[in-house]
Amino acid sequence: MPDAVSHDQPGTRPGTRPGSELHLAVALDGTGWHPAAWLEPDARPQEAFSAGYWADLAIEAERGLLDFITIEDALGIQSANRLGGVDARADQVRGRLDAVLIAARIAPLTSHIGIVPTGTMTHTEPFHMSTALATLDYVSGGRAGWRAQLSPQPEQARHFGHRELPALPASTSVSSFTDPAAQQALRERFDEGADFIEVVRRLWDSWEDDAVIRDVVTGRFVDRDKLHYIDFEGRWFSVRGPSITPRPPQGQLPVVALAHAQVPYELAARAADIVFITPGSADHAEQVIAQVLAAARGAGRATALPAGTAPRADTAPRADTALPAGTPVAGGLEPLQVFADLTVFLDDSDSAAIARKQRLDRADGADYRNDTAIFTGTAEQLTELLLDWRRKGLAGFRLRPGAIPHDLEQITRKLVPLLQQRRAFRAAYAEGTLRQRLGLLPHRASRYAVSLETGTPLETGMRRETGAGR
């Protein structure tokens, strides 16, 4: 996959139609995604482990009217080896704060922006994850989400001592994950992740919306008939429930996942609301969307295409597999939204952006590359690229600022106004939850709630669950 993006796009394009606004998020990681970003004159490495630092980043993102921020996290210390393994470097940022706890701290300091921390699944318990995220949804007033992430590295398993995991492929190339041997090694971990997400979702549903009644006259605080066992039995988890935390304000928090190849696409299709993909060009984005669409069909659901776009003709999707976001689909699954991840270095001129990245590369001793395409250029050029890529069927973008605060402020103060001029981005926040902003069904009743018409659970055929990954 290309590691750089050409930003020589055609000249001025017509503005997008009203009502076809794209979604825009930023991925926050320490002092920026470039490993030498902490050395920049405007960086704040001395504050990177403070609540105030993260609050400032969230407030800046909210100033730019962004849909949400994601907060990176992992169960292993950062490493120059992207697939894990401790290295000996002391000249790069090492150490991080817990993403869910950061999110809970900064959520009350913002009013509109979605807060989406990374929560790892491989060595944690779904019960704990469900209650932590439900609590965050209460703290934020219905603006929480969850970036579900695996921790497949063997050295991370050794932090817990519960099991050994096989080594990942020796290659650190993303292409290695398309090899049959690598897919086989990872598939079980992704199946476990699918079960993890399913258990979390069922625990969020284990309290009905009106289970807390606070009836002083009768002395009843809760209606016990509206708390439900989930009785999940699978290969990796056996969870009875119910949760200890009442149903979150959103009912179901938006779940997002990063995916680079077929097996991760399948996980997103089975369990997520949004999938982040990593294309290297507009044509590559179209190809990946077709793969995600096929995975969604295999999981019995659709993908959500933005207004004015259509799936590729050569994929021959059924009419019910490309639907507007928020459309109810059989089985309770909504259309899967596809965002593209892109790492950005933005300045007032091409030459300034290129020179700044080259300076950072020299400080780090290597040409910076990661799993995404890397854009170096101006906000004007990035605007053209985003609108061009979006025509291939992307619902939005998650931008990774190369250096913070510089590139974050370029996004919020320069890119966003340009998108607004093109009528491709909101001019103000509307009231509502994160689900509503993303075009997901705003609130669905618990799957365990009894239908007044039929007297049976809303999710028909409720029984003791067998794992989603089996």
Image (spheres, rainbow, N blue to C red):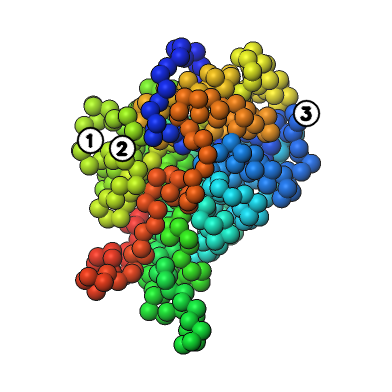
Figure check: 463 above or below 197: below
Per the image, label 1 sits on a secondary structure element best described as: loop
Residue drawn at point x = 58 percent, y = 19 percent: 378
User: How would you rate the neighbour count of disc 3 (Cα within 10 Å): few for under 14, some for 14-19, many for 20 or more?
Assistant: few
Figure check: 16 above or below 138: above
Identity, as a three-letter code, of the amino acid under mark 1: Pro
Q: Earlier in the sequence, mark 1 or mark 2?
A: 2
User: How would you rate the neighbour count of disc 1 (Cα within 10 Å): few for under 14, some for 14-19, many for 20 or more?
Assistant: some
* Front in this rendered view, residue 288 or 47: 47
Q: Which residue is mark 1?
A: 317
Identity, as a three-letter code, of the amino acid under mark 2: Leu
Badge nearest the viewer, 2 or 3 = 3
Per the image, label 3 sits on a secondary structure element best described as: loop
Apparent side of residue 279 relative to residue 42 in the rendered image (left or right): left
Residue drawn at point x = 22 percent, y = 42 percent: 320
Q: Is residue 73 visible?
A: yes
Query: What is the number of the mark on residue 349?
Result: none
Per the image, label 2 sits on a secondary structure element best described as: helix
**How far apart in space, not on screen, are marks 2 and 3 (Cα)?**
44 Å
Identity, as a three-letter code, of the amino acid under mark 3: Pro
Residue 314 location in percent, x, y?
A: 23, 26
Query: What is the number of the mark on residue 293?
Result: 2
Q: Tell me whether circle 1 and circle 2 mark residues in contact (CB < 8 Å).
A: yes
Q: Quadrant of residue 335?
A: top left
Q: Earlier in the sequence, mark 2 or mark 3?
A: 3
Q: Which residue is mark 3?
A: 41
Residue drawn at point x = 59 percent, y = 36 percent: 64
**How far apart in space, not on screen, are marks 1 and 2 (Cα)?**
8 Å
Residue 356 location in percent, x, y?
A: 68, 20
